[in-house]
Structure formats: C-alpha cells, structure tokens
Amino acid sequence: MFFHIVLERNMQLHPRFFGRNLRENLVSKLMKDVEGTCSGRHGFVVAITGIESIGKGLIRDGTGFVTFPVKYQCVVFRPFKGEILEAVVTLVNKMGFFAEAGPVQIFVSKHLIPDDMEFQAGDMPNYTTSDGSVKIQKECEVRLKIIGTRVDATEIFCVGTIKDDFLGVINDPAAG
C-alpha cells in the first residue's frame, strides 16, 4: 500500500556546493540518496514530493562539511499481510515461483498454488493446469494475496498465495 508521510534526515553537504544554489543542491542530493531506498519501518521510498523545512546547518569539526536537518514529504510503498497485489513472475521452479510487485519480491510456494496446477520442467519451466488452459511462467502477470511479510533493516520480503477466489494469472504474454 502507498502512503504519503513526512520524514527527517540529516544531510551532509561539501562546501563547494554552497552559494546561491545551496537549496537546489541539497534537494538533489536528498533525492539521489533517498529515492529507491528501503527502510524496514516505513517501506520503500518511491518519490520525494516536497520539502517542508531545511534547518540551520551545523559545521562538522575538521572536515568543513555542513550537516543540515531536512524535513521532507514522500510517497512510500509498504506491503501488508492480507493485501492483494498484481505482480510479474520472475522465476519459476519446482518449489514455487518468485514475482515482483514494484520493488518487493514475493515468493509463492507450490503449496500455495491451486492443487490442479502441476510443475512442468524444461526450457521454460511453468505451472500448468491439467487441461492446459492456464500457465504460470516467467513474465506473466499474476494477482496474489500476501500472507506474510518479513522486515529487515533495508529490505522487505513477502510470501504470497494464489490459492483463493479471483487470484491467479491475469495476463500471459505467451498466450497472446
């Protein structure tokens, strides 16, 4: 799920970036450092939407660097247990498959795939229904439900299922 929150960060800036473009230099360094990162507490920072305040700089002894406290608004992505997501399958093996929904990697075990789907090995491994009408393989889109998350300091891992109503393959590029 996406959230719009306010975060704070202390930014260090080298003296060569001081001058009339100090604010722009600080904002571009903030965007470069923060966008695309993951904090276990808030989730993945998708984009910075605005700067609320930039505090007074504090000169670091011996280095000349200045530390500025910056308060900024950003959009973050954090998956939750029970959430339904659409994801793209990245890897299929006999244990299940991995899919990605934006920056989050989700594993779906073979026990969480409908019973009528069997693993087919070969040059393009996949899970196929007994009548061959539905196929889960690399690059196909699936709708899945997150049943568990594990949060590290810099990453979020998820386990999902497609063994429920209205879940499963929603777009198969090989079929069309």
Image (cartoon, rainbow, N blue to C red):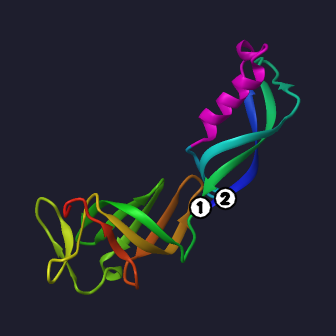
Q: What residue sits right under mark 2 in the picture?
A: 3
Image quadrant holding the N terminus, namely bottom right
Q: What residue sits right under mark 1 in the picture?
A: 78
- In the image, is residue 170 above or below residue 48? below
Q: Residues within 10 Å of mark 2 (few under 14, many from 20)?
A: some
- In the image, is residue 65 above or below residue 98? above
Q: In the image, is residue 32 part of the stretch drawn in magenta?
A: yes
The residue shown at (28%, 57%) is: 139
Label 1 SS: loop
Q: Which secondary structure class fits the magenta region best?
A: helix
Residue 65 visible in rendering = no
How many tags in the picture? Answer: 2
Q: Do the CB atoms of the residues marked 1 and 2 lie less than 8 Å apart? A: yes
Give the magenta range.
13-35
Image quadrant holding the C terminus, namely bottom left
- In the image, is residue 145 above or below residue 106? below
Decide which of 109, 129 is in the foreground and name it.
129
Marker disc for residue 92: none
The residue shown at (64%, 35%) is: 31
Amino acid tagged 1: Arg
Amino acid tagged 2: Phe
Q: Residues within 10 Å of mark 1 (few under 14, many from 20)?
A: some
Label 2 SS: strand
Q: Label 1 to label 2, Cα distance in Å?
A: 8 Å
- Mark 1 and mark 2 lie on one chain; the one further toward the N terminus is 2
The residue shown at (72%, 27%) is: 26
Q: Based on the displayed image, in which of its 4 quarters is residue 99 positioned?
A: bottom left
Q: Position of residue 33 (x, y in %)?
A: 62, 36
Q: Position of residue 25 (x, y in %)?
A: 70, 23
Decide which of 154, 1 is in the foreground and name it.
1
